[in-house]
Amino acid sequence: MREEGGGRRGREAQRCRRRRPSPSSPPLQRPDRVKVKAQRLDGSKFTTTLTGWPARIFQHEFDHLQGVLLCDRMEAEPAAAAADKLVGLERAFAVERPGVAFEAGPRPV
């Protein structure tokens, strides 16, 4: 997959369908156009260009296949806000469930 065109990028809120919708879904910049080289089940190769929402959706799903998480693509400010919210949730969990062990994740830099 590679970015196509003049490097135009769209910046829109994005979320994974595995998560519940949230008004705080982070804005991500992604190319508005991508060229995809792929292979069919019979082994024949093809190339296609995706634009608009199909391009964004493809990139999101390709990230899943590559092990890239939504938080890996977030800009610094929204990532810091999300980290602060997560720390608050972890503290609330610990208060509401004393004695239940959990390991708090590392705080992003």
Image (cartoon, rainbow, N blue to C red):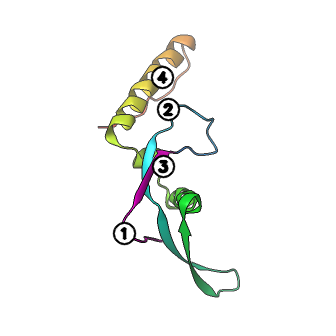
Whether residue 90 is visible, yes or no, is yes
Is residue 2 a member of the stretch shown in magenta? yes
Q: Earlier in the sequence, mark 2 or mark 4?
A: 2
Q: How far apart are marks 1 and 2 (CA)?
A: 30 Å
Percent x, y of residue 5: 41, 71
Say what secondary structure mark 2 lies in: loop
Residue 3 in the image: state x and y as whole percent.
Answer: 42, 69
Task: Please rate how many residues cluster around mark 3, counting C-alpha atoms within 10 Å: few if below 14, some from 14 to 19, many from 20.
Answer: few
Spatial distance from mark 4 to mark 3, Cα to Cα?
A: 20 Å
**First along the sequence among labels 3 and 2:** 2
Pointers 1 and 4 in contact (C-beta within 8 Å): no
Residue at image coords 59%, 84%: 46
Q: Name the residue under label 1.
A: 6
Label drawn at residue 53: none
The residue at the point 33 percent across, 35 percent down is 77
Residue 11 is inside the magenta segment: yes
Residue at image location 47% in from the left, 61% down from the top: 32
Instruction: Determine the CA span between mark 3 and mark 2.
Output: 16 Å
Instruction: Say which label, 1 or 3, has the lower sequence index.
Output: 1
**Distance in Å between CA atoms under marks 2 and 4:** 18 Å
- Residue marked by disc 3: 69
Q: Which residue is tagged 4?
A: 90
Q: Which amino acid does label 4 sit on?
A: Glu
**Disc nearest the viewer among 2 and 4:** 2
Which one is earlier in the sequence, the residue at label 1 or at label 4? 1
In the image shown, does 73 or 90 lie closer to the viewer?
A: 73
Which is more foreground, mark 3 or mark 2?
2
User: Which structural element holds mark 3?
Assistant: loop
**Element type at mark 1:** loop
Q: Residue 101 or 54: which is nearer the viewer?
A: 54
Q: Which of marks 1 and 4 is in front?
A: 1
Q: Which contiguous range is marked in magenta?
A: 1-13
